[in-house]
Amino acid sequence: MNRVEIRELTKDYGTNRVVDHLTFDVLPGRVTGFLGPNGAGKSTTMRLLLGLDRATSGTSTIGGRRFTDLQAPLREVGALLDPQAPHGGRTAHDHLLMLAASNGIARARVGAVLEQTGLTSVARRRVKTFSLGMRQRLGIAAALLGDPGVLLLDEPTNGLDPEGIIWIRELMRALAAEGHTVLVSSHLMAETASFVDHLVVLGQGRLLADTSMAEFIDSRSTPRVRLRTSDPDVLRAALEREGLRLDASEDGRWTVDGIQAGAVGALAAREGVPLLELADERASLEEAYLDLTADRAPFSSAAA
């Protein structure tokens, strides 16, 4: 099974504890966002999972096995950690061909992933001539090479143009829908909100949240409804009887805190109040994330 399991994972560098007794699962069939401030321990956790660093204590396994015990790891786990890693003197084709040969992957997969990532026309160019976006696509091609069941992607949209961002977003969703396990680390909250189903949030090496995105946002925000009506006085009186208040906003609309749109709609219908617009107003992922991690960031800018 493609389940990623982290159990009491801890990593110390001297007296500095970077990962602190982490425990969480990454499940197949959904895209999991891996969030946290700089220095939260996200990259270190990925490196521990991939056997690039040794844990001080605890375990990290993929399908019940350590990455270092996998016979052909690229056929089970694809990872994008550093798009600058490929040797600049090799061509994109030769870089992927070398990886394929080392893991018993069919040669035909090289051409397939080059086409999938839009690199066919530059496959014979040396990597040192690539732009950041092209290197990013090559890193994604390497991650996809073995058609693995698990994908670990660190900042996959970095350097991509708008078309590339849409492409990788749809790719991650499609892979999750096919039953793959997808873990994505990113600092771009608005972009992350467009494709993740589940969130794992770290702060100072510790687990702060492990929940669905909808539950995460709801837990960090107060229900609010935004509406427009041609009869605010009647609606205001009805809301006040329920202990609620109708407040004017600058754009000509009205807001009500502490209630959801369905309940306001039912109350308005009962009172015969016409509603021209009615919608729940929820916090964005960025707002909810900042609310949770405000005191967990080791570096923060002064207020403007």
Image: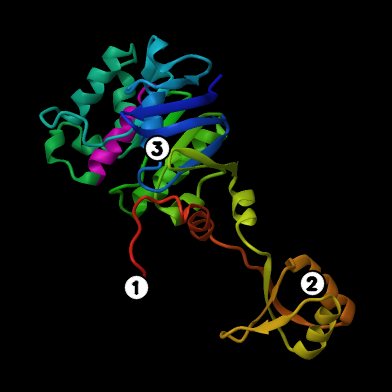
Above or below 260: residue 161: above
- Residue occupying image coordinates x 29% and y 32%: 114
Type of amino acid under label 1: Ala
In the image, is residue 137 part of the stretch drawn in magenta? yes
- Residue at figure coordinates x 40%, y 22% from the top left: 56
Type of amino acid under label 3? Gly
Quick one: which residue is furthest to the left in this view? 89
In the image, residue 240 sits, relative to residue 12, either above or below, namely below
* Distance in Å between CA atoms under marks 2 and 1: 40 Å
Is residue 144 visible to the viewer in this orientation of the structure?
no
Q: Main secondary structure of the magenta part?
A: helix
Q: Which mark is residue 57?
A: none
In-front residue for pair 172/186: 186
Between disc 2 and disc 3, the foreground one is 3
Residue topped by disc 1: 304
Q: Is residue 146 left or right of residue 136?
A: right
**Of pointers 2 and 3, the one earlier in the residue sequence:** 3
Q: Position of residue 16 (x, y in %)?
A: 34, 34
Pointer 3 residue: 41
Mark 2 highlights which residue? 265
Q: Residues within 10 Å of mark 3 (few under 14, many from 20)?
A: many
Q: Is residue 97 magenta?
A: no
